[in-house]
Image (spheres, rainbow, N blue to C red):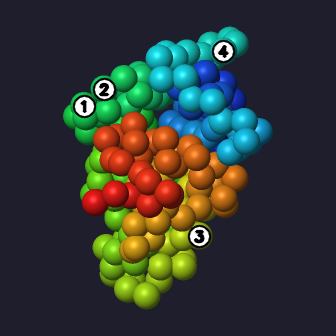
Amino acid sequence: MVCEKAVEVFTVISPIGEMIMKICPQGLHSLSQSDYICDTNFHPQERQDVVLIGKESGNDKVQKHVEDCIDWLNVYFTNVRHVGCMYMPEICVAREMGSFKERVWIALAKNIGPGQIVSYGELAKMVNSPGAAQAVGNAMATNPLQILVPCHRVIHSDGSLGQYARGKKNSVKNWLLEHEGLRVFNNKVAT
Ligand SMILES: [Zn+2]
């Protein structure tokens, strides 16, 4: 199923740099850091509020989703322990409905909260597909909703972080986990 609504694109600045939101009147299609952000130029700004750059939407429904998403991100970055009490911004349901990937994304978002981690294999078991760790890895690599679907909390069973954005943004994964209170040494979560 493909969404037939008009999708608008918005840019926000955030503690992890520029983020792009794609939103239709039904909700979010995607949220992700700008493509150009990578390990060599990632400079987190802990105290940066999440704010919209550029125009608001002329469509009230779209604008409401934009504001909900910004509010959610601000709580995530300033008071991460409370983000579990927030309603998630509305997601446009048209994407990947009922697919393996969607089941993985939902299981992850529902079950693994801030400061928690899960291995690729454990997440595969959660969706009743033990042995599908590689397919889970692929679902993570193609996650359209960065942070909202917390693929940064999925690591290898030996504690090593594994890749983020196919290896381009591993330092962002490290930063997000430490932001949530975990300690990372030599690319491994300290237990
Ligand atoms: Zn849509």
Q: Which mark is residue 79?
A: 2
**Up-down: is 109 above or below 50?**
below
> How far apart are the two marked residues, 3 and 4, measured between alpha carbons?
31 Å
Q: Position of residue 102 (x, y in %)?
A: 47, 63
| Mark 3–mark 1 CB contact (< 8 Å) | no
The residue at which mark 3 appears reads as 138
- Tag 4 or tag 1, which sits nearer the N-term? 4
Does 132 sit above or below residue 14? below
Q: CA distance from mark 3 to mark 1?
A: 29 Å
Placement of 179 over or under 2, stated as above or below: above
In the rendered image, residue 2, in percent from the top left (x then y), is placed at 64, 54
Residue 170, visible in the rendered structure: yes
Question: Quick one: label 3, few (<14), some, or many (20+) residues within 10 Å?
Answer: few
Number of the front mark, 3 or 2: 2
Q: Residue furthest bottom?
A: 131
Cβ of mark 1 under 8 Å from ligand 1: the answer is: no
Q: Residues within 10 Å of mark 2 (few under 14, many from 20)?
A: few
Asked whether the beta carbons under mark 1 and mark 2 sit within 8 Å of each other, the answer is yes
Give the number of the disc on residue 82: 1
Looking at the image, which residue is at 50% across and 72% down? 136
Instruction: State which tag comes first along the sequence, 3 or 4.
Output: 4
